[in-house]
Image: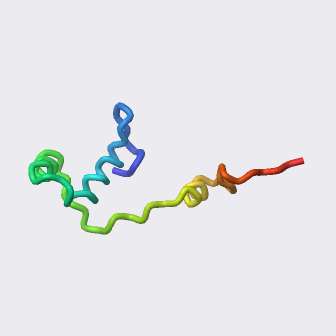
Amino acid sequence: MATGDVVVQGEDLGRWMNAQWFGWEQLLPVQQWLLENTLKITPAEDERPVKQTQDSMWALNGSSHSPDQVILTQ
């Protein structure tokens, strides 16, 4: 499940699931057990992806400028 694919009552389930995967060590043993045995979620095997900057997100969305840049037209 990718971030933004499923949103329930304003909660992005993809983002929540990523937080559980990559924050596995911070969870209590009972939380880990519940995730493994009820939702079949296991700890991430890869490292957490690098967080994107605001400019890289704007670039991915096809905008040629960020909102911080002023565009002057005549």
Residue at point 28% right, 59% down? 22
Judge left or right: residue 9 versus residue 41: right
Tell me which colouring the rendered structure shows: rainbow
Residue at the limit of the structure toward the top, as seen here: 9
- Can you say whether 10 is above or below 26 in the image? above
Residue at point 38% right, 64% down? 49
Question: To which quarter of the image does residue 38 belong?
Answer: top left
Residue at the limit of the structure toward the right, as seen here: 74
Residue at the limit of the structure toward the bottom, as seen here: 46
- In front of the other: 62 or 51: 51
Locate residue 13, reporting x and y percent. 33, 43
Locate residue 61, reporting x and y percent. 59, 53
Residue at point 10% right, 54% down? 29
Judge left or right: residue 58 versus residue 41: right
Locate residue 55, reporting x and y percent. 59, 58
Locate residue 6, reporting x and y percent. 37, 41
**Total tally of numbered discs in the picture:** 0
- Can you say whether 56 is above or below 31 in the image? below
Residue at point 39% right, 49% down? 3
Judge left or right: residue 73 versus residue 8: right
